[in-house]
Amino acid sequence: MTLNTSRRGFLKSAAAAAAVLYVGARPDGALAAGSAPAQLNPFVRIDADGTVTAIVKHFEKGQGPATGLTTLIAEELGVSMEDIQYEFAPSDPSRYANLAFGQFQGTGGSTAMANSFMQYRQAGAAAREMLIKAAAEAWGADVSTLSIEDGIIKGAGQQAPIADFVGAAAQMEAPAEPRLKDPSEFRLIGNAKVKRKDSLPKTNGTAKYAMDLHLPNQMVAVIARSPRMGGLAAGFDDTDAKEVKGYIRAAVLPNKAGVAVYAENTWAAFQAREAVTVDWDLSNAENRSSDQIREQLLNAVNSDPEYNVNGADPAATAALIDGAEKVVEQTFYFPLLAHAPMEPLTCTIEANEDGGITLHDGAQIPTGPHMALAEIFQLPMEKIRINTMLAGGSFGRRATPTADYQVEAALAFVLTDRSRPVKLVWSREDDITGGYYRPAVAHKVRVGLDAGGNITGWDHRIAAQSIIKGTFFEPMLVHNGVDHTSVEGVPDGLYQIQGQFVGLSDVAKATNVLWWRSVGHTHTAYVMETMMDEAARAAGRDPVEFRLALLEGGGKDQERLAGVLKLAADKGNWGSAPEGRSQGIAVHKSFGSYVAEVVEISGNADDGVQVEKVTCAVDCGLAVNPDVVKAQMEGGIGYGIGHVMRNEITLTDGVVDQFNFPDYEPLRIGDINAIEVHIVPSAEAPSGVGEPGTPPSAPALANAIAVSGPRVTELPMINSGISFA
Amino acid sequence: MALSLKLNGQTHEVEAEPGTPLLWVIRDELKLTGTKFGCGVAACGACTVHLDGEPVRSCQTYIEDAEGAEITTIEGLNSKAAQAVQAAWVELDVVQCGYCQSGQIMSAVGLLSENPKPTVEEIDDYMNGNACRCATYQRIRSAILRASDMMEA
Ligand code: FES
Ligand code: FES
């Protein structure tokens, strides 16, 4: 028995070298297969021993794409979730471009599932058809009599594991249009019992994040950065650092943006950095305070806007509002926010024997650092390898258009003799003070209502620090001067509002700004949904009924938005809050998904508000992994509510005032007592789930507070006199 | 200075300066990376380990104060409470990015070891120092209750 088993094992591994089946797509999108990945962009690999591996092109930062893409392959191929594994695709934009980003490989904008839904299913289905065809030929059977279930090909009185036909299938052409399962045949897609693929390693300490990498002989580098954006290092004194055991040396970065401090280990690097005194040239550095930035933003929304966003005539809108029966008006201010992913930023660079470079990184947009490193090291793209590791959260931070921390690591590496790998580590203080914030934004809205409580005019002015201008995304996302991410959710909102004018002004950035979970929707949803409540109140109508009336008679988009609004209201017992509690509701579409949330609170603004319960309804098309969708809604809600309660980044004379979690206090376990998520059954194509849970959460909370407390228009809420229990 | 550390049932001889946080000895010297660095100032709990069975923040525990104690990291957990907690975590798919979860689990095991039947308020109170930026708190709470039931069974 033992002999047989090991002999079989030997034969299998001998065959393994020869026969591997890859199925994926050619650069033009056509399905392709082969025994090597060279000419295609593989989505699945089946080894000669029958091991099935999904090749995941999106990186995993907790939002579950590894589980989702694996589910798609397993479903169409006919294997169980236990029998499929996954690995991350190498960085190669020509092969793994995210369809939503053009020639860019990346994860963001909640696109992972939308982008891959058809691609990965087709790859799985093609592999199934090829394996069945190989079996049918061997057995002299008709393909229509065979099927694959749990990795076994069955039919015509025969059965065999898929392993037996990998070699034969690898010789075939991929079918041009494999038959996809009808949704009624799904066993894994949409199954709430399908488990995450990464729970176990993340529960027993074995999961390896970029921060966990220890390459032999590596150095740790930390950077002393300018306290104010734009400051340059003119020199440094490291006399005291030499007393720190494990300190190696320090050097001014080639771009003068900081001083790299090298040490044998992380703690020595942190200590040595404390002991290095840097001479900063601050002559061109930012010196504004956030109060001044706030003033500039508020002035801008009170002046004529720089850009007309929706082409409406502001004078006509003004006339409609001036002639209205009632006018509601509010001005809003949103502060800078840090992303603060749990794992501080880090990556490691080493030299390869072939003269190339390897970057080990939890890269969110690998193409960005890939191109940046090719430039810095003056190497062709194929000489730069990227080892994609797990990332401990991102919320947008690991996806800077400038590849900021990877460039820092590369510059720190360039200053060495390249014999030792360099691991760049950010501390939490580096993270909180390091820029790339959600921009500060102001809105001013005036709404006119007629005697019947109908909206007659809506004047909406936004002033923001543009995220996109000056980056390579500008040609895609800035049109006629309007950065779409500054306004998304307003001109393209789904309410059928009469006489709406939308204007935008840009205000110069005092720090680098960046997309932050749900990007522009972080503030536009807050403004739209709190103003809806204000308008409903002025009209003397119920907030849900008021919103539904503005959606009625629209298209499918409006119907889907109304659908989640009604579902959330129903499940959240809208209108029948228990004694001592208040409810607020909000609904918003972002990233193709429709989400409504009812927030129920107890207490009050003076003695402390407690979020008792959040009831969420989501329509994200077909929910591939319903439990992952629920988890993303829970997380998105927590992220939104935590920040709106108490987080802000402020500057004094250009210097960030906050340092670490004690003054950028994260959401804690007791802040929300319960979250309940309901998914609308749908056969529509899947849309995003990583971000859409966030936008409605903050306005729903604000609306609950406003029932018997103040209308909060200045964030975070603690700055508006709201205390929390 | 030379120290000997009792960690996960084994004795390790290490070289470290006084005042070095236990966290960095565990991660950088002993290369046990399940214990995470999140803030360095005892404000997030990602670095939680057990010292003689009690959860402590290893980023604020000096190495000289850990000498002589039994140190347990996520890699060395094996108590009944630990098994129940880890099983409940997998059953309820608590994790998202997962970076905070070693610390969450170390704290949850600490809680259930001293209080096998905690109320929701007691859970929220005990777990208050463990931040999760992915906001998996709902599931953490449910998993602790589930683990408590499992321990009883
Ligand atoms: S790293 Fe120790 S509590 Fe945050
Ligand atoms: S799971 Fe990401 S920080 Fe907790």
Image: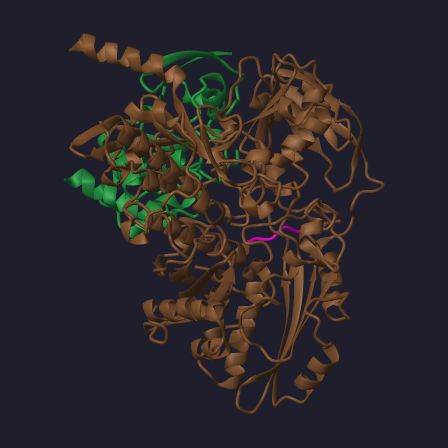
Percent x, y for residue A506?
A: 74, 59
Q: Quadrant of residue A417?
A: top right
Percent x, y for residue A640?
A: 50, 56
Give the residue displayed 56% in from the left and 68% down from the top. A493
Percent x, y for residue A480?
A: 74, 60
Horizontal side of residue A25 vs A299, given as left or right: left
Give the residue displayed 56% in from the left and 23% down from the top. A267
Q: Nearer the viewer, residue A604 or B37?
A: B37
Secondary structure character of the magenta stretch overall: loop
Question: Is residue A424 a member of the stretch shown in magenta?
Answer: no
Percent x, y for residue A634?
A: 40, 53
Q: Nearer the viewer, residue A171 or B153?
A: A171
Residue that sits furthest to the bottom in the current view = A451
Residue A188 visible in the current orientation: yes
Question: Is residue A650 a member of the stretch shown in magenta?
Answer: yes
Quadrant for the C terminus of chain A, please. bottom left
Q: Is residue A160 above or below residue A351?
A: below
Horizontal side of residue A267 vs A180, given as left or right: right
Colour in which the image shows chain A: brown
Colour in which the image shows chain B: green
Q: Which residues are magenta?
A: A647-651
